[in-house]
Image (spheres, grey):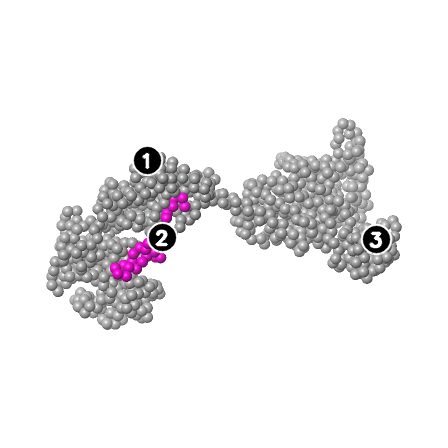
Amino acid sequence: MEKYRGLSPAEFFHRNREMAGFSNPVRALYQTVRELVENALDATETHGILPDIKVEIELVEGRENWVRVTVADNGIGIPLTEVPNVFGRVFYGSKYVIRQTRGTFGLGGKMAVLHAQITTAQPFYVKSSTMDSPAVYEYRLYIDISRNIPHIVGFRLKRKGRSKWHGTVVSLVTEGAWNLARRRIDEYIRRTALIAPYATIVYRTPEGEVVYERASKKLPEPPQVGKHHPRGVDIEILKNLIRSLSEDMPLKDFLRKYFESVGEKSAIDFLKWANLDPETPVKSLRIKDLERLANAMKRYEKWRRPRPVTLSPLGAELLKEGAKRILEPEFVEAVTRQPASYGGHPFIVEAAIAYGGKIEPQNSPLLLRFANRMPLLYDEGADVSRKIVDSIDWSVYKVKFPAPLAVITHVCSTKLPFKSVGKEAIADVPEVERELEIAVREVARKLRLYLSKMEKLHEVKRKELTIKRYIPEVSRSLSYVTGIEEAVLRRKLEELLEKEIKKRGVVANAPVIQAA
Amino acid sequence: MPRSSKQRKGGAVAPSDAEVLSRLEALGKKVADQILQGKPPYLEIPVRTLSNTVWDEKRKILVLGPRKARREFFDIGESKKFMQTVLMLSLIVRARREGDYPTIRDLYYTGKHTIHYRDLHGRRRSEETWNDQRESNAVIQDIEVATGLLREHMGIMHDAKGKIVGNVVIRSKGYEIDLSRMGSGAYAVPPNVDRLEILRVDADYVLVVEKDAIFERLNEEEFWRKHNCILITGKGQPDRSTRRMVRRLWEEFGLPVYILTDADSYGFYIYSVYRSGSISLSYESERLATPEARFLGVSVSDIERYKIPRNYIIKATDRDIKRAKELMNYPWFRESKEWMKELKLFIRKKEKVEIEALSGHGFKFLSHTYIPEKLQKGEWIV
């Protein structure tokens, strides 16, 4: 006889860990660092705090492929009683709202914790303190996988005293292939420093310490919590919304109050179009009615576009700062596009181009992709940005390969159109593709202006040098033929050349003249 | 034909050494003056391209047209050539001042050295004043047209390969040389023909043969003595001194000039060079071309007329045909009905023969029958 039983969420993810990016020891280590760093950033910048983040990687002696990962931030901290649940319980958190967040699965560090526990069987360590808490508290925890509850094995409480410290430190021992993952993780930290130029990141590894000092004290506007856009709903969302209503209301009011960009008039227009009675009390709607409603909401074409308040782009200035700090180019230009939407989800595209300086010349543009201020490192070939960058004829923008050219793209959205469960590549959704291409071409045009200017300057300089190097020969020859002193001719020629360069910069080609 | 001692009819006189030097110096002075007056220096050089050559109908030669180009030192594209031109000018002036006679290759080596400089990025770089002889030769030609002097006037030598034999007495470096007393040999035409004096000429015509081997054969038979002519060869494509020699005998002594080449487009082209000069060096034709030179043979129609045996006939290549078509565009061929007929025949029949093909009728056929008969019947083409 078959036995049937429910699977706890923790157990489900334990069994399907490749879905969350923990498929092998290389990827798992990368993913661990990534989840913890992104939590750290979300705990700081989203709340108006300039991030100070420490990332430490240590190899555990005597244990092959055991790596201790410690990430510390100066964020808002986690309330004393929430700590075990936040880390010890899958699907528990504050990210299940409509706004742009980094965490890809709403799992935050939990998948990392789960993976650590499965592979090394070591408890993980959390230290935290909120701003108003008088104490700093430390936990050593396990997750009870089958019951999806935290299990506390150690706890300490210390008065803060004079220190005003707040933030969170997470430390865990996990199985990972540091040697193989190292370059990816280095690159991940580097790119995070690019997209978060307002963060100071101390990155310590067995190989040494790198400090990325913050390049700006300006934080981007944090995203606000928004409402669902009518085009982005499904039956589950409708059901949950209606269930949470404390009192019943007519359908038209429900639409107006609980959905983005819907007013009295647009609600009635829509319901008329959908053949639904605006006065129907929502709680009386049955599953069938909800299905009809959801379908109509998706198909209706006259909804206003979602407002982008739920999004938080970096802004052109900060993007430039970030690119300067990491790539040290001679030229950088960035653009933030106007908000747009696809299928009811608002999104904003940003792009930057960096050229020259410390960027190594390559045969195709170096591409740095970001989504919701997270670097995307894997699956570049499948990403829509790569497709766009490769389809552009760069010679139009005066770029000749090999060229020291880097293209940075950043897509922000409440729902990123990822190509696969790996969540490392943005799919080629036409609306997003179009915006990206416009953005990249816009900064590329600025690059062309810069390159033409440089070209002209170089041209003039080159001309001057070319002519200058023949002056000694010409003076010597003419001096011999005419008996005029060589030094006189030379000085005079140098003066003339300088005058000529100043006057015209460029000497026109000699015209053919008719003899008299 | 009666033997007669030809009198000098005159002709262009080569400029004196002093004149040559002062013209060269004047070119340099013009540039130096521009510099001292605070003007961007330039050289004015007649354009040496096909588009700037003019067919002089009356004199039947190609001459340089009126177009001149400014070679500005401060024009990036011309700067190096400007430097090369004044460098070459100084080398030639030095040779004249010191009485040296360098060859064009000597000048190439004397002027070739390395210029060191730093580029835009401050890297050390170097560059040769010129990379090969074509570059130094080109500026010699520029100086020739800019000053109106030929390189021979400027005392520049080249490998002379012409040979001459016949009843002519010349004086060179004070020695009188009788060109009829060379035995089995011949007098080698020197590079600067204008520096020798032609004292006496006792001949009825000049016979120019394309090939050295035919020249040797005719000389061995003393053809020139029997037929009272002057025999010359330029060994294929003639150099300037051979052409100048032919030109002087025609111009100064009024001798008719006959040219004997293979019957193919290459032979016809050689005739064309003796007669009118090459297109790229049209500025020389005034001193080097012999516009009345007559083409004695071997003509395409001779193949039929002299019944040349089939085994001597060679099939013309595509290149021969292409060349013949080009020749049809040369003004001096285009205005000659007979030449057009010959060239069309050549293109149609696609057959060529060498002079040696005449030996099909015996080794003496050329000297005993062909040449005298053609001269007598007036079967030449102009």
Residue B264 at what x, y percent from top left?
29, 65
C-alpha distance separating marks 2 and 3: 88 Å
Mark 3 in CB contact with mark 1 (< 8 angstroms): no
Question: In the image shown, does A131 or B284 lie closer to the viewer?
Answer: B284
Q: Chain of mark 3?
A: A
Return the residue at label 3: A253
Q: Is residue A325 left or right of residue A502?
A: right
Q: What residue is shown at x 58% (from left), y 40% (from top)? A: A328
Task: Characterize the local packing of mark 2: few (<14), some (14-19) or many (20 or more) Cα atoms within 10 angstroms.
Answer: few
C-alpha distance separating marks 3 and 1: 98 Å
Question: In the image shown, does B19 or A395 lie closer to the viewer?
Answer: B19
Q: Which three-letter amino acid code belongs to the residue tagged 2?
A: Gln
Q: Is residue A336 left or right of residue B331?
A: right
Residue A264's place in the image compared with B107, above or below, is below
Q: Secondary structure at mark 1?
A: loop
Report the magenta residues as a range: B49-75
Return the residue at label 1: A485
Give the mark, 2 or 3, whose residue is nearer the N terminus. Answer: 3
Q: Is residue B57 magenta?
A: yes
Residue A1 at what x, y percent from top left?
83, 56
Q: Which mark is residue A514?
A: 2
Do the dots labelled 3 and 1 sit on one chain?
yes
Q: In front of the other: label 2 or label 3?
A: 2
Q: Chain of mark 2?
A: A
Q: Is residue A464 magenta?
A: no
Task: Characterize the local packing of mark 3: few (<14), some (14-19) or many (20 or more) Cα atoms within 10 angstroms.
Answer: many
Specify the quadrant of the image occupied by residue A483: top left
Specify the quadrant of the image occupied by residue B29: top left
Q: Chain of mark 1?
A: A
Do the dots labelled 2 and 1 sit on one chain?
yes
Task: Examine the rendering and report whether any part of residue B364 can be seen.
Answer: no
Q: Is residue A440 left or right of residue A146?
A: left
